[in-house]
Amino acid sequence: MEEFPRTGRKERRKLINKIVLSMAALRLMSGSIEIIAALLMLRYNQIEKALMVNTGLAMVGPFVLLTTTTLGLVGLADKLSVGKMLWVLVGVSCIFIGILRK
């Protein structure tokens, strides 16, 4: 019977792409900030303070979106044509225009 080689811990780490790891870490950080914000709202138990915390979150969300998208585009830069890259940038711009317009 043939035995399959076991992969060690170091070999498994090589399988995780650094850009994907960075994107996931940013999303975990963003989720942690959201949970902390919710706990702060509950602790203060005041509408005014909860609104202030929520406003702070409104600034964090777009930053995380932009950063993770940028990391993803950097990772795909060698695989995407210039035209496709421009379409992605137009799409992200539309998202931000929709978020920031009153």
Image (cartoon, rainbow, N blue to C red):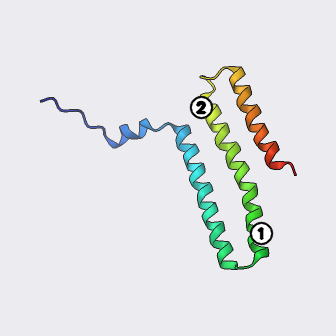
Q: Nearer the viewer, mark 1 or mark 2?
A: 1
Residue type indicated by callout 1: Leu
Mark 1 element type: helix
Identify which residue is drawn at 50% across, 36% down. Answer: 17
Q: Residue 19: which quarter of the image?
A: top right
Q: Quadrant of the N terminus?
A: top left
Asked whether, in this view, residue 68 is left or right of residue 21, the answer is right
Q: Is residue 61 left or right of residue 17?
A: right
Q: Amino acid at mark 2?
A: Gly
Up the image or down, 84 lies above or below 69; here it is above
Locate residue 40, reporting x and y percent.
66, 73
In the drawing, what numbered circle is on residue 51? Answer: 1
Q: Residue at x 68, y 73 (%)?
A: 41
The percent position of residue 100, horizontal first and vertical second, equals 83, 49
Q: Position of residue 74 (x, y in %)?
A: 64, 32
Point out residue 85 in the picture as x, y percentages from the top left corner: 70, 26
Q: Is residue 9 left or right of residue 16?
A: left
Residue pushed farthest left?
Answer: 1
Q: Secondary structure at mark 2?
A: helix
Residue 47, by quadrant, is bottom right
In depth, the one of 101 and 61 nearer the eye is: 101
Q: Nearer the viewer, residue 25 or 101?
A: 101
Up/down of 78 relative to 36, above or below: above
Vertical order, 44 against 21 (above or below): below
* Residue that appears at 37% across and 40% down: 10
Residue that numbered label 2 is attached to: 75
The crowding category of the residue bearing disc 2, from other C-alpha atoms within 10 Å (few below 14, some 14 to 19, many at least 20), is some
Q: Crowding near pointer 1: few (<14 within 10 Å), some, many (20+)?
A: few
Q: Which residue occupies the foreground of this view, 26 or 86?
A: 86
Q: Which mark is residue 12?
A: none
Residue at x-position 62% and y-position 67%: 36
